[in-house]
Image (spheres, helix red, strand yellow):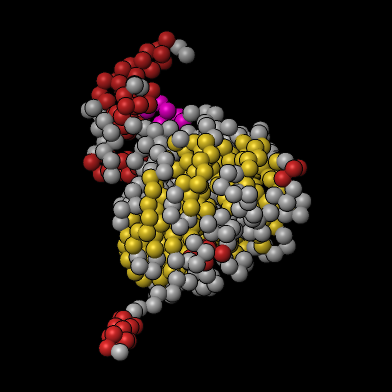
Amino acid sequence: MTAALRLVAMLGAVALSVPAVAAEPPPNRQAELLALLHQDCGSCHGMTLRGGLGLPLTPERMDALSVESISETILSGRPGTAMPPWAPFMTADEARWLATQLQTGGNPP
Amino acid sequence: MKTLLLAVLAALSLSACVSVTATGDLGVVIERADGKVAVVNTTERTVLAEIDGLGDLSHASVVFSRDQRFAFVFGRDGGLTKVDLVTQRIAGRVLQSGNSIGGAISQDGRLVAVSNYEPGGVRVFDADSLEMVADIPTGSKVVGLVDAPGRRFVFSLFDAGEIWMADFSQGPSPRMTRYANVGKQPYDALITDDGRTYIAGLFGEDGFALLDLWHPERGVRRVLDGYGRGEQPLPVYKMPHLEWLTVSGGLAYLPAIGRHEVLVMDTATWRQVGAVPVLGQPVFIVAQPDKRRLWVNFAFPDNDKVQLIDVESRSVAATLTTGKGTLHLEFTPRGEEVWLSLRDEDAVSVWDVATLTPITRLNIAKPSGIFFTPRAYKTGM
């Protein structure tokens, strides 16, 4: 990676990490993401996110992790486990917003 | 004399208001978000009653008593609820673990077993009283629990990669047989309709683990090994469910995992003889009762469609757009109609199997599993 590219990447990371709140998805997209969380993530983690074949995604567990780490797991999955990558279905900002939702309880249905 | 007359009158007035409920065309539909089940009639295509108070049914399955009167509902929160389809009331309920996945009823109908994630293990209950008969801790999440002939239950350990058999033929203390190293991460299993062969699907590798229950001493062997041929698996957004189905010519069909294929296996040799490409990750593969076509639904993001595989040509004969969140399907007992649960449309859609057209829709909130009472007579259902 060239120095210039690295700088761009760093700036990108800074730009992305700072406005985690500012980059909140519009309300209709938020509703879609929460439906995805409870229905489709819920296939393994349970509709109430208390766990199933996948681990529980309770606020107590999610609070112990950083938003960046959670959103990276959402986007890229966890190789070697059953957790698939969700990057085809959401942006990095949306994954970060979902991570904050998980830390606050994910707005149960 | 006067007393006798009163008794006769009472009997007469009773018989005048007795309504008879036949259970052969009943079923239950899980309303996964509300902790309810809908009791349905497949002849009338109606919802007869909604029964509330079953706890967390976000993942749930059902088995029936051998008289088809009671539905045993296994909920996500460890709840085991016995629903009386005749009185349409809860006849019994126990919260038997923290997190469960499914269950089975013994061949004689007297034992109900539940497989649990937390704490990992199997608990077995008296089907009449729901009192616990046996507790079998495994230290691992349990999947693929089925009933086998001879008062046996067979199940798989997701974390440990083992298959266990619990034999209750000698009484309430089961005789246990354990098979270790059957493969990585068994995620579900099935038993063949003759009750002879138990097959667990592996998530952690391309293959299935097979146990011949006529010869349990021969141990577990691998079948369909390496069906992915080493290719990078595609992501799986929902685990498939395994149910047994065979078609003419002794072929069986099973979902691949991480590949958008339905695998075809020769049941004489247990070897793969083909694969049918489909549009997504298969979840359920269900045969029409005439076994001419197989209906396949899919994991997210393809869960609005169903594909039909023609058995003669072993190829996709039709692709139906059935509705958003098509989670499950169940055929009427002799197969003229099929009911499909459409989670995201809050409806169950009934289709004509001959013409492949929708007939009617029932308003049922967030439906998932559909279970009709003829399952009472099927091993492994």
Residue B65 versus residue B233 in the image, above or below? below
Front residue of this view, candidates B40 and A79? B40
The structure residue drawn at horizontal position 58% and vertical position 44%, both measured from the top left corner, is B173
**Residue A13: image location, x then y, percent:** 34, 19
Q: Is residue B223 magenta?
A: no
Front residue of A97 and B66: B66
Q: Residue furthest front?
A: B1
Residue at point 36%, 71% (across, down):
B46
In the picture, measured across the screen, residue B245 lies left or right of residue B351, that is right
Tell me, yes or no, if residue B256 can be seen here: no
Quarter the N terminus of chain B occupies: bottom left
Q: In front here: B160 or B324?
A: B160
Above or below for B257 versus A17 = below
Q: Residue at x 48, y 60 (%)?
A: B64
Q: Is residue B235 above or below residue B6?
A: above
Residue B12 falls in which quadrant of the image?
bottom left
Magenta segment's dominant SS is helix
Task: Give the percent coordinates (x, y) of residue A69.
Answer: 38, 23
In the rendered image, residue B298, in percent from the top left (x then y), is placed at 50, 51
Query: In the rendered view, does B216 fall on the left or right side of A100?
Result: right
Q: Is residue A76 a member of the stretch shown in magenta? A: yes
Q: Nearer the viewer, residue B207 or B49?
A: B49
Which quadrant, please, contains the C terminus of chain B? bottom right
The magenta span reads A71-77
